[in-house]
Image: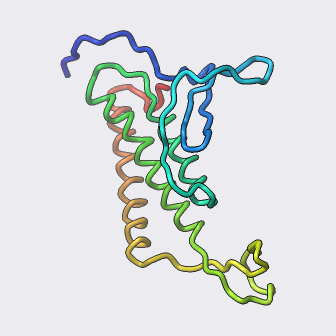
């Protein structure tokens, strides 16, 4: 496909020398210090707002950062290649969000502690519960279609002697 003129690729965050750092809901690109400390952030992006007190929120924020890191590709100005390379981690992120949903749904019960589950700080047991049937079906569809589409996109790149990972 024809390529349009491309400006110099200056990445928002150079992943060979920088990391994401989550402070509240702000995701910052922070330079690694060879001595183990941190330098000042180069840029930041909000990953959400609201109640940040539960494990599922923190898991979603983490996976958002992982997905955005994967989408921080080296752009080629070939719109098709750039689109496919960015969509692969985006699709993988949707699958991970379903993993978080399934792993986070629980119901508080008056268990005597002899069953399976984990203890809540209140002393009550959190027992695994089934997620809403609509969401279970949605996640099943997401996992099936996204896995198939990731494989198709990787095959499309391979047919052009290109790899999926350019970050």
Residue 9 location (% of width, % of height): 40, 14
Residue 11 location (% of width, % of height): 46, 19
Q: Residue at x 76, y 17 (%)?
A: 34
Q: Identify which residue, 107 or 96, lies in the foreground.
A: 107
Where residue 21 sits, quadrant-wise, is top right
Query: Relative to 34, does residue 156 appear above or below in the rendering?
Result: below
- In screen coordinates, is 120 left or right of 84? right
Quadrant placement of the N terminus: top left
Q: How is the image coloured?
A: rainbow
- In screen coordinates, is 103 left or right of 114? left
- In screen coordinates, is 35 left or right of 45? right
Query: Relative to 120, does residue 100 appear above or below in the rendering?
Result: above
Q: Residue at x 74, y 88 (%)?
A: 111
- In screen coordinates, is 152 left or right of 57? left
Query: Relative to 118, does residue 159 appear above or below in the rendering?
Result: above
Q: Residue at x 73, y 19 (%)?
A: 33
Query: Relative to 61, does residue 166 appear above or below in the rendering?
Result: above
Which residue is situated farthest in the left direction here? Answer: 2
Residue 129 location (% of width, % of height): 58, 79
Q: Residue at x 67, y 86 (%)?
A: 109
Q: Identify which residue, 23 or 155, lies in the foreground.
A: 23
Q: Identify which residue, 50 or 140, lies in the foreground.
A: 50
Residue 149 location (% of width, % of height): 35, 49
Where residue 24 sits, quadrant-wise, is top right
């Amino acid at each position: 496909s024809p390529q349009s003129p491309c400006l110099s690729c200056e990445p928002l965050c150079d992943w060979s020398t920088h990391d994401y750092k989550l402070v509240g809901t702000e995701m910052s690109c922070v330079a690694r210090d060879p001595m183990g400390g941190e330098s000042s952030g180069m840029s930041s992006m909000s990953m959400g707002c609201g109640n940040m007190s539960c494990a599922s929120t923190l898991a979603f924020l983490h996976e958002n950062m992982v997905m955005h890191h994967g989408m921080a590709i080296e752009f080629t100005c070939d719109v098709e290649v750039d689109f496919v390379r960015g969509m692969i981690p985006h699709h993988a992120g949707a699958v991970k969000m379903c993993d978080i949903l399934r792993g986070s749904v629980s119901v508080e019960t008056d268990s005597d502690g002899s069953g399976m589950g984990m203890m809540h700080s209140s002393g009550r047991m959190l027992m695994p519960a089934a997620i809403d049937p609509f969401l279970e079906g949605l996640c099943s569809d997401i996992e099936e279609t996204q896995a198939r589409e990731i494989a198709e996109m990787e095959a499309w790149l391979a047919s052009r002697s290109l790899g999926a990972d350019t970050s």
